[in-house]
Amino acid sequence: MKLINNIVDISKMNSGFFKVNLSNENIVDVTEEIVQSISQYINAKHINIIFDTNTEEKIIACDPEKIERVILNLISNAIKFTNTDGSIFVDVIDKGDTVEIDVKDTGIGIEEKHLKNIFERFEQVDKSISRNAEGSGIGLSLVKSIVNMHGGKISVESEVGKGSIFKIELPVKIVEEIEVCEQTKACNNKIEMINVEFSDIYSI
């Protein structure tokens, strides 16, 4: 299902039908809530996850569902490359005109030769049996596209044996008209999104 969803979304992007529905959201709450929502998954892998922020509130125009999907994907990747008793850090940093969301792990790291292609479709940085789980190699391509559609950018730094850090930088802007989203399905949608995103790590 995860692979099918990703392929469908890539097709939508290529056809111009993949849209972001912007609303004014506290990006700190959006990020913290998704971290809290996956605590049971993290605990099952005996990995620590730590959320931190230098501000309690930062309102920006974003599509919260798609930003949650981006963060979930990055955390999912961090879990795959982090061994038992390792740590994942999720930080929100208010930088004035931009806000940065960092997902850092203490995992196996990524070789420098792979970093320039890591956001390309179907690129897998480690095809060896040392990986904790396999993926399709298209998730990070979608992540980059979603971040770009928000007017932001994403980058990665890594060192073999020490871990990786993915940095998302989003512009601080506000939309005048906020579309009212359907809230009744929000909880179930989030649970389903988590289950799908983590489907290649856990047997559900």
Image (cartoon, rainbow, N blue to C red):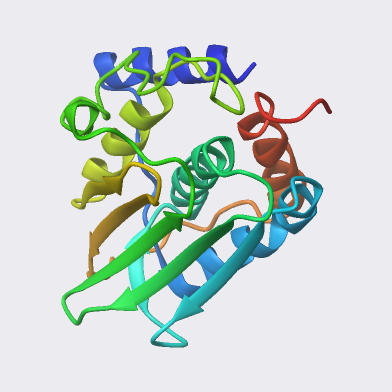
Query: Where residue 199 sits in the image (x, y, percent)?
Result: 69, 26
Q: Which part of the image, by quadrant, shows the N terminus? A: top right
Instruction: Name which residue lies at 42% across and 57% down.
Output: 104
In screen coordinates, is 38 left or right of 59?
Answer: right
Instruction: Name which residue lies at 59% across and 21% down.
Output: 2
In screen coordinates, is 111 left or right of 196?
Answer: left
Residue lying at the far front of the rendered structure = 161
Image quarter for residue 51? bottom right
Q: Nearer the viewer, residue 35 or 47?
A: 47
Query: Where residue 139 sits in the image (x, y, percent)?
Result: 42, 27
> Is 10 located above or below residue 96 in the figure?
above
Q: Nearer the viewer, residue 121 or 28?
A: 121
Image quarter for residue 143? top left
Residue 176 visible from this viewpoint: no
Residue 29 visible from this viewpoint: yes
Query: Where residue 33 sits in the image (x, y, percent)?
Result: 62, 65
Query: Where residue 14 sits in the image (x, y, percent)?
Result: 26, 15
Instruction: Name which residue lies at 42% across and 21% down.
Output: 9
Q: Which part of the image, by quadrant, shows the C terminus? A: top right
Q: Nearer the viewer, residue 195 or 60?
A: 195
Image quarter for residue 194? top right
Q: How many marks?
A: 0
In screen coordinates, is 159 left or right of 38?
Answer: left
Instruction: Name which residue lies at 42% across and 56% down.
Output: 103
> Is 109 located above or below residue 163 in the figure?
above
> Is 100 located above or below residue 72 in the figure?
below
